[in-house]
Amino acid sequence: MKTCKKCKVDKSITEFYEGKGRVCKACYRLSRVKYYTANKEHILAKNKNPEFRKKARELHAYKMLNDPEYKARYSAKRKRFRDKNKDELRAYNLAYIKNNTTLRKEKKKAKRSTPEYKAQEKEYNLKQKTNLTDVYVRQQLIKHTSLKVADIPQALVEVKRIQLKIKELVNEKR
């Protein structure tokens, strides 16, 4: 049991924030509300300040990386919000996709034309080819046919992989 400094009531330790002194959660929340209503204009002006917002983002990122409790609370808060506003979020996302399809396509096209992206893509494709991944083998199977990826059974992928390995070995011997 612990006594709140403001309301002078004995309460359980769970009724107090860790590191917030001797004030219970209810009194602390009440003091925050009073402070906000008294200083609303100053707080809103401060929040619009880009330097303040940058520091707040940096602090948030630091806490997300280094404080598991903060990360868990933040994740739970976001999940509650998403669950509570599922329909509104879905409508917003659909409207965004509908209104920004061409913009998204242009951004994607611009990104794909950069030398960095092309180098990454080349490296990825080479890795797929040398490891003979399922994706690469399926692409080879559908290359000159009317087959769809979903139509190809795993057994056929394995057989094609063996054929490609044999072909590679034969080319090495030449």
Image (tube, rainbow, N blue to C red):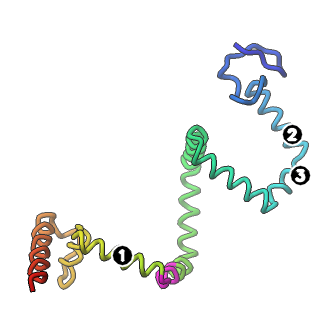
> What amino acid is at disc 1?
Glu
The location of residue 122, given as percent across then percent down, is 36, 79
**Residue that mark 2 sits on:** 35
Magenta stretch: give its range.
108-115
SS assignment at label 3: helix
Q: How crowded is mark 2: few (under 14 residues within 10 Å), some or many (20 or more)?
A: few
Please state the horizontal and vertical placement of residue 174, each as a whole percent of the image. Answer: 9, 86
Of circles 1 and 2, the one toward us is 1
Which tag, 3 or 1, sits closer to the chain's start? 3
Any mark on residue 76, and which?
none
Asked if marks 1 and 2 touch (Cβ < 8 Å), the reply is no
First in sequence, mark 1 or 2: give its number: 2
View extreme (front): residue: 173
104 left or right of 5? Answer: left
Query: What residue did someone put label 3 on?
Result: 42
Quadrant in the rendering for residue 26: top right
Looking at the image, residue 22 lies above or below residue 117:
above
Mark 2: amino acid: Tyr
Q: In the picture provided, is 26 more to the left or to the right than 14?
A: right
The residue labelled by disc 1 is 123
Q: Earlier in the sequence, mark 3 or mark 2?
A: 2
Q: Which residue is drawn at 74% across and 55% down?
A: 55
Residue 153 left/right relative to 85: left
Secondary structure state at the residue bearing disc 1? helix
Is 114 included in the stretch rendered in magenta?
yes
Q: Label 1 crowding class (10 Å Cα cut-off): few <14, some 14-19, many 20+?
A: few
Query: Foreground residue, 11 or 130?
Result: 130
Q: Work out whether residue 120 or residue 8 is closer to the camera in this orientation and state it.
A: 120
The spot of residue 96 in percent (x, y) is 57, 69
